[in-house]
Image (cartoon, helix red, strand yellow):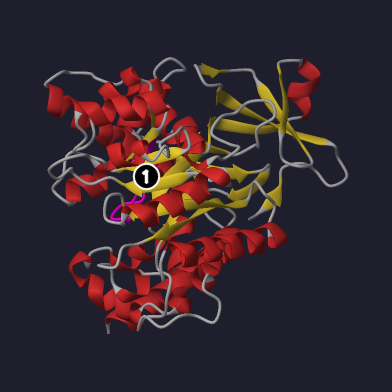
Amino acid sequence: MTQAGVPHGSREGGWLPDLVYTGEKFESGLAFFADATGRITRFSREPADLATARRLEGQAALPGLVNAHSHAWHRALRGRAESLDRALAGLGEEEVFDTARMVFLEMLTAGITCVGEFHFLHARPDGSPWPEPHHLAAEIIRAAHEVGVRIALLNTACDLAAPARCRQAGADAWVRETEALGRAVEKNYPADEVWIGAGVHTLGALPPDQLKVIAGHARAQRLRLHAHVPAAAAGRTPLAELAELGLLDKRFTAVDAGQLGDEDVKLLGAARALLCACPTGSLAAGQGVAPVEKLIAAGAGVALGTDTHARTDLIGEARLLELFQRAATGRHSVLAVPALFHAATVGGARSLGATGGALEVGRPADFFTVNLHDPSIAGADASSLLAAIVFGFERRAIRDVWIGGRQRLAAGRHVMHGPIIGRFSDGQKKLWA
C-alpha cells in the first residue's frame, strides 16, 4: 500500500526504527523527521519526539540505494541473453513500458530508490522514427513515475555500427532530442523526481567531432555524462581523447571500464570523475572489473549499476565488487564495508546528480528498512549489521521502501505488484512465443 509518511494536514512526520544508519554507523533510540515535501528536517532523541514518530519495530533503516547504470529493456532478455536481435525486433512501445515497470518494481524490492537509465532504444523495432523522437524515453520515465522511483534519463548516443533502432541522425539530432526531452520533463515532473543526463554508448566509437558536440552540450548544460569505456587500442585511450578535448570533469562517469590502465586512472582521479562498476555484467561478459582501489586513491569516485539486469541486486553488486578485488589482489580484504555501501548510495547519487544517497537533514526521506529477524542477518548488532547486510543478507530481508517520505513498498509489496508482474509476464509470452 502506498501512503504518505507525513500525516495529512501535518507539517512533519517521523519514523523510529530500532536502528538508523547515519552514514558512519547504526544508531538506536533515534527518530528522524520529514516535512510535507518529503525532505528530512531533523533527527531527535527527545522522548516527546520518539513518542510521536511512527514505530518501525524490529527494523533498521538505511538510505535508499542509487543504481547508476541500467538498461531497463534488457530485463526482457533474462535467461535469453543470446536472443538480443529478436528482442530488438519485438519490443514495441507497450512491451518497453511494461518491461520498464517490471524492472523498476524489482529495483524497489531490492531497496533501490533512484536509477540512472542509460537509454539508447530510440526508434521503432524496424528502425523507423517515432512521431516524437523521444517517445520511448518518455514511456520509460512514465513507468518510473508509476512505480515511484526517481530517474535520471541518460539520453545516449550510439555510433553508426549500432542496430538501426539505437541510432540517431548525428550529434546535432541528439542535441535537439535531448533539449526537447528536457523541456517535456521540466513541464511534467518535479526536478528531483525526473531529470535528464547525457550518455555515449561507447567512448571512442564516435568520431571526435560528434563526441565534441555531445560532450560539449552536456558540459554547457551541466548534465551528467556517462559512457562505456572499452579497452584501448593502439595509441591514445578514449579517456585521453576526451581529456584532450577539455571535456573530462567531475560530471563524467566511466561505465564498466574493466581495462583501465594507470594513465586512465590518473586522468579520472585528476578530474574527480567517477567509475560506475557493474560486476555482474562484467563477469557475464568475461571481463574484469576496474582497479577500484587505485581509482579511489587517485581521487575518483565509485558508483554501482545493475547494467543489463541479469540480476537486479545492488547490494549483491557491492559484494561482488569486493570479491573481484580480492581475487585480483590475492588479499583477504580490499575495500572497507562502509566504502562498498557508499558506492551503492552516495557514489551513485553523485554520479547521477541525485538529491538522495544519505539520511541527512535537507535530503529527501528516501530509505528502505530491513527485518532484523530475517535469518540472513539475525544476530547482527549495530557494529556488525552493515557488514552482515553487504556480505550476507538476502533480498527477502527488505521490508519497506519510502521515497520522499511516501511508502512505495510495504512488507515487500507494491500497490500495483500483481498488475505489473501480470502485464510483464503476458508480454514475455507474446515476445517469445
Residue 44 horizontal/vertical position (percent): 72, 18
Q: Nearer the viewer, residue 315 or 201?
A: 201
Q: Is residue 91 above or below residue 152?
A: below
Q: Quadrant of the N terminus?
A: bottom right
Q: Is the magenta region chiefly helix, strand or loop? A: loop
Q: Quadrant of residue 139?
A: bottom right
At label 1, which amino acid type do we have?
Answer: Gly
Residue sitting at 27 percent across and 33 percent down?
A: 321
Q: Is residue 208 left or right of residue 363?
A: left
Q: Quadrant of the C terminus?
A: bottom left
Q: Is residue 397 left or right of residue 265?
A: right
Find out whether residue 87 is within the magenta segment: no
The residue to which callout 1 is attached is 305
SS label for mark 1: loop
Q: Quadrant of residue 341?
A: top left
Q: Is residue 308 above or below residue 24?
A: below
Residue 48 horizontal/vertical position (percent): 81, 20
Q: Is residue 197 above or below residue 370?
A: below
Question: Is residue 264 something one can see in this rendering?
Answer: yes
Query: Magenta segment, which residues?
Result: 303-316
Question: Is residue 336 something one can see in this rendering?
Answer: no
Residue sitting at 55 percent across and 40 percent down?
A: 353
